[in-house]
Image: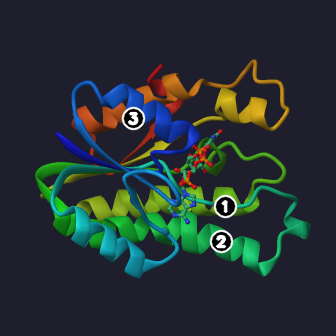
Amino acid sequence: MKVLLIGATGTIGKAVERALSDQHELITVGFRDGMHQVDLGNPASIQRLFETVGKVDAIISTAGLAKFGPMAQLSDADFDLALQNKLMGQVNLVRIGQSYVNEGGSITLTSGILSRHPMPGSSSIAMANGALESFVRAAALELPQLRLNVVAPAFVKETMAMMGMDSTHGISAADTSKTYLAALSGSHHGETLDVTDHL
Ligand SMILES: NC(=O)c1ccc[n+]([C@@H]2O[C@H](COP(=O)([O-])OP(=O)(O)OC[C@H]3O[C@@H](n4cnc5c(N)ncnc54)[C@H](OP(=O)(O)O)[C@@H]3O)[C@@H](O)[C@H]2O)c1
């Protein structure tokens, strides 16, 4: 399959690329790196990406920015980042990208477990995650020609280590990538796929 992987240069994206590259033709996209660049916060940039790349069999997004931090310290701009980048950036991947996916293909987005298992500091991320999961459930009803799903990763070991946290209970990026593989090759539609269910 020809797979457009957005966020390919990130912690989860690199693992997804490694997991898929044997069997699929990957087009990697980052913000600064990758074969192509896109700014999820800018719909014109998303439109340009699809016009450049053309039709694909699948779109996978492992991108989406949102700020972690105590709610009282999050600014309007911090909440706006979650809304414009993580939420609307991925919603726009579906709105714009749906006409670039071949019949029977799929789109897989990324939310996160914080939508249903929040922790202090997660208010803006959880807001975007929950909205994405609801969007996918509803939008799938209007997309009979393709499958639309969202993967909800748990805390990734490599990310926890990078943040100086104890990563004992994290899930490696390689294990996280298995859920994207399940979304790509399975029959799910309109679903939130928890990484913890696909280990
Ligand atoms: N890591 C975790 O523990 C964890 C847990 C739950 C959910 N998630 C979610 O999983 C997703 C990926 O997380 P990650 O840790 O792999 O992220 P990451 O390592 O920070 O990678 C982010 C990726 O997104 C790209 N990117 C940055 N700004 C962008 C923009 N404005 N437009 C388009 N792409 C942009 C980056 O490209 P460049 O490298 O070119 O800048 C990179 O490919 C995020 O939605 C995150 O919320 C992560």
Q: Going from the N terminus, do you reach mark 1 or mark 2 first?
A: 1
Q: Residue at x 61, y 24 (%)?
A: 171
Mark 3 lies on a secondary structure that is: helix
| Real-space CA distance between mark 1 and mark 2, rounded to the nearest whole angstrom | 6 Å
Q: Judge whether residue 144 can be spotted in this image.
A: no
Q: Nearer the viewer, residue 58 or 33?
A: 33
Amino acid type shown at disc 3: Glu
Mark 2 lies on a secondary structure that is: helix
The answer to whether marks 1 and 2 mark residues whose Cβ atoms lie closer than 8 Å is yes
The residue labelled by disc 3 is 17
Q: Nearer the viewer, residue 36 or 169?
A: 36
Amino acid type shown at disc 1: Ala
Q: Is mark 1 within 8 Å of ligand 1?
A: yes
Q: Is residue 3 above or below residue 185?
A: below
| Real-space CA distance between mark 3 and mark 2, rounded to the nearest whole angstrom | 26 Å
Mark 1 lies on a secondary structure that is: loop
Q: Residue at x 84, y 57 (%)?
A: 69
The residue labelled by disc 1 is 66
The residue labelled by disc 2 is 81
